[in-house]
Image: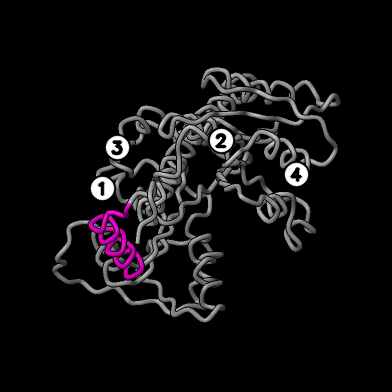
Amino acid sequence: MVKPGVERPDPDKLLRQVLAEERYQARGRLKVFLGYAGGVGKSFRMLDEGRRRKQRGEDVVVGAIQPTVSAEVDALLQKMEVIPPLTVDSRHRKRWEDVEELLSAGISVVATVNLQYIDEQRERVEGITGKHVEHTVPQSFLSNADEIEVVDAPPEMCRQRSADAPLQHGTAAEGAVAGQEQKLSELREIALLLAADVVDQQLEAYLERQGIEQLWGTQERILVFVTPEVDGRAMIASGRRNADRFHGELLVAYLAQPDLTADEQAALEVNLTQARAAHAHIEALDGEDEVDTVLQFARSRGITQIFVANRRRDDWRERIFGGPLERLILTAENMDVRVFPQ
C-alpha cells in the first residue's frame, strides 16, 4: 500500500535500473593511465598496478606491451605472466576494440594512452607538439573508464629535453626550457580537464544505476578547495558544470595564510581568478588544521560535495599512515569527496 502523497515507483524505471546494474556488474572494470608526454612512466605505473593486484590474489596477465621498454619496465615484466603475441587476422581493426570485447566478457583491463592518440584531441595536441599520429582511440573509450589517473611529467623532463637539444648556451637555452614548460603546461591542462570529464560521467552513470538522480537539485552545494600547490582549473570547471547541471551552488574556498611567498600567492590567485570566471562564491577560511577547517565550513553551509586535489606525497609518514586527504574522506559524513588527479 502506497501512503497518500508518496509517489508510486515507476516499474519500468525500476526494471531499467536493475538491468543496468546487472550489466555493470557483469562487465569488467577499465582503469586508464593517461599521459600527456612520452617517457613519463605510464607503462611502469600500469605494470606496477598489475603487480599489486597479483599480490592481492587476482589472476593477472600482460596481454600487450610495446616492443622496446625501459629496464624498470622489463624488471616488472620478468615477474609477470606475458601472453606471447601471435600474427593472426584479427576480427578488430583497433586495439581498443579488443579491450571492449574483454570488458564485455567480464575481464578487467588496465591500460595506458597518451593524450595525442585520443581522436578528438589529436589536432589540438598536434598544434602544440607539432607531432602527427595516425592511429587513435575515440574519446568515448576513455569516457567509459571506471578509473582514470593522469601520469604527470616531472619538471626535470623539461630541463632534460632542453639539454638534449642542439642549442646554444645562455638565452637560447633558457628560452627553450621556458617553451618546453609552456607546452607541457598546456598539455597537462587538457589532460586534467579530460580526466575531470570522465569523473563527471562516472558520477552520472552511478546516479542513473542507483536511481537517485532525482535527489539532486537546488540543495546541491559543491565546495572546491584550492591551495597554492594545486592546479584548480579542472576542479573548478567540473564544479561549475555539475552546479549548472543540478541547479546547485558552487563555492571555492582556500585557507588564509599570511606567510605565503610571492610565488605561492600568485599561484593561489590563478585559482581564484578561475573561480571568479566560473561565478563561484569565494571564501577565505581561518584555521590551523586544514581538514578540520574545511569540514567545519562545509557543515555550516550544507555542502554536499567536496572537490579536492590529490597532491603528491613527499613525506614518508603520509605515504605509510595516510595524510590529510585520507582523514578528510573518513570524516566527511553525509558529504561526497571527489578527488581529482594532479
At a point 36% along the width and 68% down the height, the residue shown is 25
How many numbered circles does the render carry?
A: 4
Mark 3 against mark 4, which lies toward the viewer? Answer: 4
Question: Which residue position is annotated with label 4?
Answer: 291
Earlier sequence position, callout 2 versus callout 1:
1
Of residues 233 and 315, the one nearer the viewer is 233
At a point 50% along the width and 77% down the height, the residue shown is 78
Asked whether the viewer can see residue 166, the reply is: no
Question: Which residue position is annotated with label 3?
Answer: 120
Mark 2 against mark 3, which lies toward the viewer? Answer: 2
Q: Label 4's element?
A: helix
Of residues 18 and 265, the one nearer the viewer is 18
Real-space Cα distance between discs 3 and 1? 12 Å
Real-space Cα distance between discs 1 and 4? 45 Å
SS assignment for the magenta stretch, majority: helix
Q: Label 1's element?
A: loop
Query: Mark 2 touching mark 3, by CB under 8 A?
Result: no
Q: Amino acid at mark 2?
A: Ile
Asked whether the viewer can see residue 261, the reply is: yes
Which residues fall within the magenta stretch? 8-26
Within the image, what quadrant is residue 156 found in?
A: top right
